[in-house]
Amino acid sequence: EPEVTQTPSHQVTQMGQEVILRCVPISNHLYFYWYRQILGQKVEFLVSFYNNEISEKSEIFDDQFSVERPDGSNFTLKIRSTKLEDSAMYFCASSGAPLGEQFFGPGTRLTVL
Amino acid sequence: SQQGEEDPQALSIQEGENATMNCSYKTSINNLQWYRQNSGRGLVHLILIRSNEREKHSGRLRVTLDTSKKSSSLLITASRAADTASYFCATVPLGSGGSNYKLTFGKGTLLTVNP
């Protein structure tokens, strides 16, 4: 069964460093999302992406964040200069249709020291 | 306002019993989706129910939706120890236009099924 994959599963970085989180959505999906979950808190929406552009972004998604679909399969989230409060589990999701089920990847646990 | 609030926050039952979790939301929705998350792991999609639907089944799962009360329930019948996880409801607001279909999650219900 097709699934969303994410790499790495765990990333440890120093404050101020750049990180790139990678996702491979389900191959025929067109709608892509990033969410994050700080330990013990709700899953929060970060950004949605369709047709090679951002559809919507949350207040969390400031200038330090960017997303890209560099090729036909990968979808990346870049954090330019990480902060301690960026430590969280980051989930990628994809959907094959507007208003359809969103399928999530296993997540990348980001730890900023 | 907070969208998608589940109750109870935690539920502990014996294997074989049924588990019911509830979700309330504040704004009108297009659809509501239930997810399961095992500790520290990814989110597994369970069921999507649209605003014009009242009930859906999938295996041992039954989801109801009452748009007049802005609430949904997830029933797991004949629970198993492997059902132990956190369960979340997530909503897509009505009027989502263009390609904006973000999910708004609740805090979840932690279900423990004791063998």
Image (spheres, coloured by chain):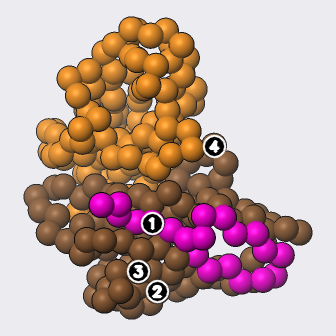
Q: Check disc 1 and report its element: helix, strand or loop.
A: strand
In primary-sequence order, the first of circles 3 and 2 is: 2
Q: Nearer the viewer, mark 4 or mark 3?
A: 3
Q: Residues within 10 Å of mark 4 (few under 14, many from 20)?
A: few
- What chain letter is assigned to the residue under label 2? B
Helix or strand or loop: what does disc 2 sit on? strand
| Span highlighted in magenta in the image | B1-21
Separation of residues labelled 2 and 4 (CA atoms) = 28 Å
Q: Is residue B7 left or right of residue B25?
A: right
Whole-angstrom CA distance, mark 3 to mark 2, is: 8 Å
Q: Residue B71 bears which disc, if any?
A: 3
Q: Which SS class for mark 3?
A: strand
| Chain at numbered mark 1 | B
Q: Which residue is mark 2?
A: B64
C-alpha span from label 2 to label 1: 15 Å
Query: Which residue was labeled with disc 4?
Result: B40
Q: Of residues A82 and A41, which is closer to you in this image?
A: A41
